[in-house]
């Protein structure tokens, strides 16, 4: 994998507004962040601003080189959410208590499952963030 140039990396981080671009985890809290190739390098995805996003370690670790997943509601295989080409609010929402992500579209639902965005540890973390006023983001 080619290293991401430092200035490009900085641009990606600044654009993300200090949140994981998939699960919106506040990066000031989760501490470790990674730069994700939305289309993986192994699938020919370029190291360019339009193909990069900031993720928490959890999202990136579960996304791996996947580009699509099954919508749990229909069984249809659909593309994962693309933070460069799609708007987060079109595909996701928060549960009333702020601890769970809700998929609004096939892509939203499939991405939640593939990246395990509602795993127990994330929901527990969000519960604390809600208490602290860090979550959900406005
Ligand atoms: Zn995340």
Image (cartoon, rainbow, N blue to C red):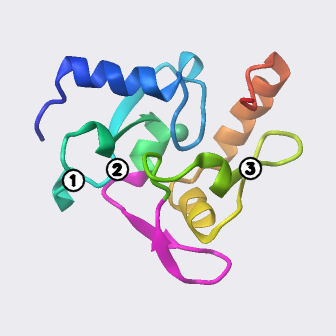
Name the residue located 75 percent from the left edge and 32 percent from the top edge.
136
Which circle marks residue 38 in the picture?
A: 2
Q: CA distance from mark 3 to mark 2?
A: 21 Å
Which circle marks residue 93 in the picture?
A: 3
Lower sequence index among marks 3 and 1: 1
**Callout 2 touching callout 1 (CB < 8 Å):** yes
Name the residue located 25 percent from the left edge and 25 percent from the top edge.
8
User: Is 54 positioned to the left or the right of 45 in the image?
Assistant: right
Looking at the picture, how far across and down is residue 45, in whole percent? Answer: 21, 53
Magenta portion: prevailing SS class = loop
Name the residue located 68 percent from the left edge and 78 percent from the top edge.
73
User: Does the magenta segment cover residue 78?
Assistant: yes
Q: In what quadrant of the picture does the N terminus appear?
A: top left
Callout 1 crowding tier (Cα within 10 Å): few <14, some 14–19, many ≥20? some
User: Is 117 positioned to the left or the right of 126 in the image?
Assistant: left
Looking at the picture, how far across and down is residue 130, in whole percent? Answer: 81, 27
Rendered position, 49 above or below 111: above
Lower sequence index among marks 3 and 2: 2
Q: CA distance from mark 2 to mark 1?
A: 7 Å
Q: 121 or 90, which lies in front?
A: 90
Q: 68 or 61, which lies in front?
A: 68
User: Is 50 positioned to the left or the right of 103 in the image?
Assistant: left
Q: In what quadrant of the picture does the C terminus appear?
A: top right
Q: Which residue is mark 1?
A: 45
Lower sequence index among marks 2 and 1: 2
Residue most toward the right? 96
**Callout 3 touching callout 1 (CB < 8 Å):** no
User: Does the magenta segment cover residue 52?
Assistant: no
* Residue 44: quadrant of the picture: bottom left
Question: Magenta stretch?
Answer: 63-80
């Amino acid at each position: 994998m080619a290293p991401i140039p430092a200035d490009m990396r900085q641009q990606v981080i600044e654009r993300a507004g200090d949140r994981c671009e998939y699960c919106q985890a506040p990066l000031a809290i989760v501490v470790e962040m990674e730069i994700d190739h939305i289309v993986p390098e192994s699938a020919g995805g370029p190291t360019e601003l339009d193909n990069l996003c900031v993720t928490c370690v959890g999202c990136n670790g579960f996304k791996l080189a996947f580009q699509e997943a099954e919508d749990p509601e229909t069984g249809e295989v659909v593309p994962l959410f693309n933070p460069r080409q799609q708007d987060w609010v079109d595909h996701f929402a928060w549960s009333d208590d702020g601890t769970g992500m809700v998929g609004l579209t096939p892509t939203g639902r499939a991405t939640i499952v593939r990246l395990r965005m509602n795993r127990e540890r994330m929901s527990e973390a969000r519960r604390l963030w809600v208490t602290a006023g860090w979550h959900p983001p406005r």
